[in-house]
Amino acid sequence: MKKLLVLAVVAGLGYLVWRELSAEKAERELWREVTDPIS
């Protein structure tokens, strides 16, 4: 039972990290698009 709890905590932390990284990537792409000089 303890192993299952540890696994759930690790999975939750992994999900939070992944969500944060993907949000940063999307924000960077948005800023790159906004600040891109018009060619």
Image (tube, rainbow, N blue to C red):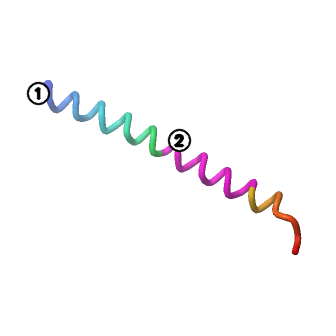
Magenta range is 19-31
Image quadrant assignment for residue 32: bottom right
Examine the residues drawn in magenta and state their main secondary structure: helix
Which x, y percent locates residue 8?
A: 26, 34
- Horizontal side of 24 relative to 9 (left or right) equals right
- Horizontal side of 15 relative to 39 (left or right) equals left
- Horizontal side of 8 relative to 1 (left or right) equals right
Q: Residues within 10 Å of mark 1 (few under 14, many from 20)?
A: few
Mark 1: amino acid? Met
Q: Which residue is found at the position 67% from the left and 52% from the top?
A: 28
Which x, y percent locates residue 4?
A: 16, 32
Relative to 30, residue 24 above or below: above
Q: How many numbered circles does the render carry? A: 2
Q: Which residue is found at the position 71% from the left and 57% from the top?
A: 30
Residue sitting at the far bottom: 39
From the image, which quarter does the C terminus lie in? bottom right
Q: Secondary structure at mark 2?
A: helix
Q: Is residue 22 magenta?
A: yes
Identify the residue under disc 2.
Answer: 20
Relative to 29, residue 8 above or below: above
Q: Which residue is found at the position 76% from the left and 62% from the top?
A: 33
Residue sitting at the far right: 38
Identify the residue under disc 1.
Answer: 1
Q: Is residue 1 magenta?
A: no
Image quadrant assignment for residue 35: bottom right
Which x, y percent locates residue 5?
A: 21, 28
Which residue is at the front of the view, 6 or 31? 31
The label nearer to you, 2 versus 1, is 2
Q: Residues within 10 Å of mark 2 (few under 14, many from 20)?
A: few
